[in-house]
Image (cartoon, grey):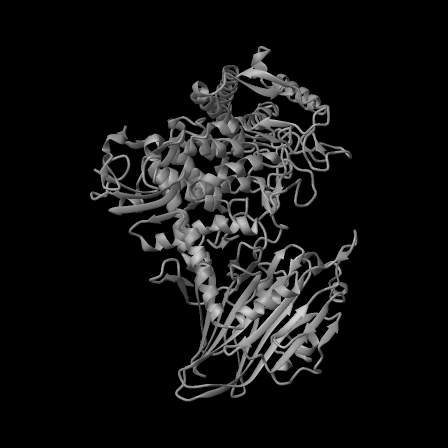
Amino acid sequence: MKIVFGKNFLEFKTEGSLPASLYFPLCNTKGLKSYITPYLRGDIKLDQDIFLLQPQTRWDIQTSLISRKVFVILKKKILTLHNLPPFLEKEKLYVEAGPLYHKIVKEFPLQKIIIEATNFVPLEFNTEVMIVRIKNASASSIKINLLLGFPLYCRSAHNIRDHHHVTSLLNRTYIKKYGIINKPTLIFDERGHHPNIHTYFCFSFDEKAYPPQYLYSDIEGFTQGGNLDFPLSLFYPPPKNKKYIEGKEVVAGFKYVNVNIPSQKYKDFFVILGICTKNAEYQKILKKFSDTKNIYISLEKAKNFWMNKINQIYFYTEDNLYNNWIGWVRLQPLLRKIYGNSFLADFDYGRGGRGWRDLWQDCLHLLFVEPNSTKKLLIHNLQGVRVDGSNATIINYDNSFRSDRNNIPRVWSDHGVWPFFVIKNYIDFTGDYNILFKETTYWQDHLLKRCTLTQENFPPDYKLRTSENKIYKGTILEHILIENLIQFFNVGRHLLTRLENADWNDALDLAPLNGETVPFSCFYAYNLQQLSILLERIKPYVSKSVYIFEELLTLLDTLWNKPSYHKFSYRRKIFENYMQKILHFKGKKIRVDIEDIIKDLRTKALSWIEHIRNNEWINIDKERGFFNGYYDEEEKRVEGVFRKKVKISLTPQVFSILSGVATPSQIKKILKSTEKYLWDKRLKSLHLNNNYKELNLKLGRMFGFSYGDKENGAIFSHMNVMFAYALYERDFAKEGYKILDSLYKLSTSTSISKIYPCLPEYFNLEGKGLYSYLTGSASWYVFTLLTQVMGIKGNLGDLIIQPKFTGKFSSSSIVECRCNFRDKRLHIYFYNPYKKEYPFYKIKKVMYNGKDFSLYIVNNKVHIPYKIIKKLDSVHKIEINLS
C-alpha cells in the first residue's frame, strides 16, 4: 500500500493492495457520524442509540458480509465493488480521497468497465450521499443491470447482543417511489421503553432523477435464499409489490435494469442514506437532491468547508509529503470534537462524548484557531470540577457532564493537572489574567470524597450548594487551587500523588489505595510553581487579596501552621481533614492575601521538586539514568534495576523534564537511557516502556496486554509527542525534533503502518498504526509545532516568536506558518538561506507588512507588545530573516 498526494492540497490516491482494516471518517457538524472502508464497510449513526447502518468494529470490517453493496451484471458476469480481497481476476482497486470525501475506483480490464463510488456527508443534512458511477471503457455500447443494497440496522448499538431479533419486530417499513423509510415504534429499553421519534431512510435515483425499476425492503426479499454477498435478487424481482411491512430486518435494495452506456461514456446513480425526526425533512432532502446538480454542489461545499477549517492553522516546508500529512493531522482535533472517543472502527469501547483530559488538551488547538471563543469554553469546563478536586469524566455533545461512561465511580489522578496548564497558556496568549477571578459553579453528583462515598440526595442540577442551599460560585483561581493543592496532600508513603484508579495511562488501574504516580507528581509540582510565578507577575495589576471558601484554608497550611511535608502522616492528615470538612460544605468565604498564596505554592513546589529529584532518580552508570514512574498496590517501586534487568517507562521521563525536576545533566542521561532501552531500531521510534515480562496485577491491566500493543510498550504517539514538547521546552531542540520526525516517518511509511494519512494513537511491534483520527496526540503535535518549532507563544498577551528549526525545518530555505493570535491573523514567513540549525542562527531582521520591525528583536526572539499589535491590520504578514 502506498499513498500518493496529488496537485490539490491534501488530496491523495492509493497504490497497491489495500488492507481491509483501513477506514476513513465522513461526518458533518450537525451530528451525523459515518466511516467507510475501501470495501464499503463501515457504519452511520447519530449516537450510541441511533445507528442507521449496523455498528462495526475493526474485526467486523474485515470479516462481515454487512456493507454497502454494489453489483453490476454485464453479459452474465457479476462484478462487485464491495467484495473483500483477494480478487480472482485482474481487477485493480484504488482510493482517491480528500477532506472529507472518499472515492473507491475499481477497474475491470477484462470487461473494460470501471465502477466508482464516491461517498460524502453534506453539511446541511444528517445524510450520507453515495455517487455510483459506471464507466464504459470499451469500444462499443453496453447494457448492464445494477443492484445496490444497504442493510439498515435502525436501532441502538446495545441491540447487537441485547434483543437483536425482538428489536427487529419494532420496525415499520414503508416502500416509496424512490426508496425505503423505516420508523421503529419504540426505543427498546427494559428499564423503561419509550416511543421512537427517528425515521431512517434510504433513497436512490439515476442522473435524470428516475427511480429504480425494483425496490427491495427486507433481508428475505433481498437475498431470496442467497446471502448478502450473493443475493438472488440479482436475477429475480421482489417477491411481492408491498407498500408496507412490519417486523422485518430492513434492507434497502435498488435494481436498475437494461441500462445502456455508450462507448467511453458513464452513467451516475445516487443513494441518499439518512436519519431525521420529521417526515418533512426527508421530503426536503429528496426534493433537493433529486435535482442532481445539487449533489455535486453539496460535495464542493463540503470540501471547501473542511479545507477552510484545516487551514485555520497552516504549515509549509519544502517537504511536500510532510505538508500534506500535517494537514490531515490538523483535521484530527476537529474530528474528535465530533466523534468524541467513539464511533470509528477501532474505538469500540465508548458511547460518545469526550473525556476530561481530551476536553482540555483539545483547547490547546483552539487557542490558535478560535482564541476569542476559548474563554467561555474554559470557564464552562471548570464547572465539571467537584469541590474534592475530582471531576466529571465524560462531557456530552451538549456540553453537559456525567460521572463516567460505564457508571463506574472512578478518579484519574492526572485530571487535575490539565486545566491550569491550558488556562496558563490561554492567559499568556490573550493577556486575560482576569479570567482567574471570574466565578463559576462546582459540580456535585452522587459521589463524594473522590468517589469513595455515595449520597442519595444531591442537587438535581448537579451544582454545589452552600449550607443555606444557595448555588455556590468560586473563582477560576479557586478551582485551580483545589485541583492542585489536594493532590499535593493526597499522597502515598513515598510522598507522591496517589494513583487512585489510573493516571494518563488508563491501564494502570489496579492500585487504587497504595499506588503512586511519579510523572504526575512532577506535573502537579510544576503547576504549583508556575501558578506562583503567574500570580507574582500579575500581582501589580490585581487586588491584593482574593476570596476563597473557608474550608480551602486547610490546604493553604503555611498560612496557619509550620508544615512537615517530609512526613506522610502530616500530609495525609491534612488531606483527610479537608475531605471531612467539605462533606458538610458551608460556602462561607474569607479573604486571603495573594502574596500569602504565592509563598505557600512556592514552598510546596520547591520541597516536592527536590524530594522527587533526590528520591526517584535511578542512576545506572556515568552515562545513563532515569526516573522511576510508579509504586504499585504493595507499595513496591515499579521501575529501576531488578536482578540486573532494567525496567523503564517513558512517561516519568517526559514529565520530569517538562516540570524542571530533571536537571540538564539528568536530561542527557535520560536521553541515553531511552535510546538504549526504548528506541526501536527497526521502526526508529520510542516504545512507551520496555518489556517487563510480568503480569503485575498489583498495578494494572496493561501487563496483561501483548507487549507492543496499547499501553504495554506500544509506540504511543501521545507520550512521544509530549516527550518532544518537553525536550524543546528545555532547549533540547535537536532531540525533540528526532521524536516528531520519527512519528511522521512511521505514519507515512504506509506499506508498514497501513493507514490513511493521520497520526494514530499508537503503532504496534509490526509498525501498524491503530486507533486512527481520534487521538489527543494530534492536538499536542500541532501545539508543539506552533509553540516550540515555530516558537509562536504569548507572554501576558504580547506576541513572542522564537523558532527552533532543525531537520526539515532548517533544511528548508523558506518555512511558513499561519495561525490566529488573539483577534489577528498571522502569516509568518521564516527565511533561512544558509539553512542553519538552532541554535546556530540569530534573528537578523523582522518585517511587518513591509515595515521594518527589527527593533522588536530581544535576546534572539521577536517580542511585539500587544499595544502595538492591536493598532495594526487584522492580517499580519511577518517576515523573519535568520542569519
Q: Is residue 6 visible?
A: yes
Q: Residue at x 37, y 37 (%)?
A: 788
Q: Give 743 or 33, whichever is nearer the viewer.
A: 33
From this view, report whether residue 582 is shown above or below residue 82.
above
Q: Give 644 or 305, whichever is nearer the viewer.
A: 305
Q: Give 437 or 136, whichever is nearer the viewer.
A: 437
Q: Is residue 291 left or right of residue 46?
A: left
From this view, report whether residue 647 is shown above or below residue 240.
above
Q: Residue 838 location, x and y as percent? A: 28, 37
In the picture, which quadrant includes the N terminus?
bottom left
Q: Give 793 or 112, whichever is nearer the viewer.
A: 793
- When asked about the image quadrant of residue 53, the answer is bottom right
Q: Residue 691 location, x and y as percent? A: 52, 43
Q: Is residue 869 left or right of residue 379?
A: left
In the picture, which quadrant includes the C terminus?
top left
From this view, report whether residue 120 is shown above or below residue 397.
below
Q: Residue at x 27, y 34 (%)?
A: 839
Q: Is residue 689 visible?
A: no
Q: Residue 559 location, x and y as percent? A: 57, 12
Q: Residue at x 73, y 71 (%)?
A: 248
- When asked about the image quadrant of residue 712, the answer is top right
From this view, report whether residue 557 is shown above or below residue 319.
above
Q: Residue 529 location, x and y as percent? A: 48, 23
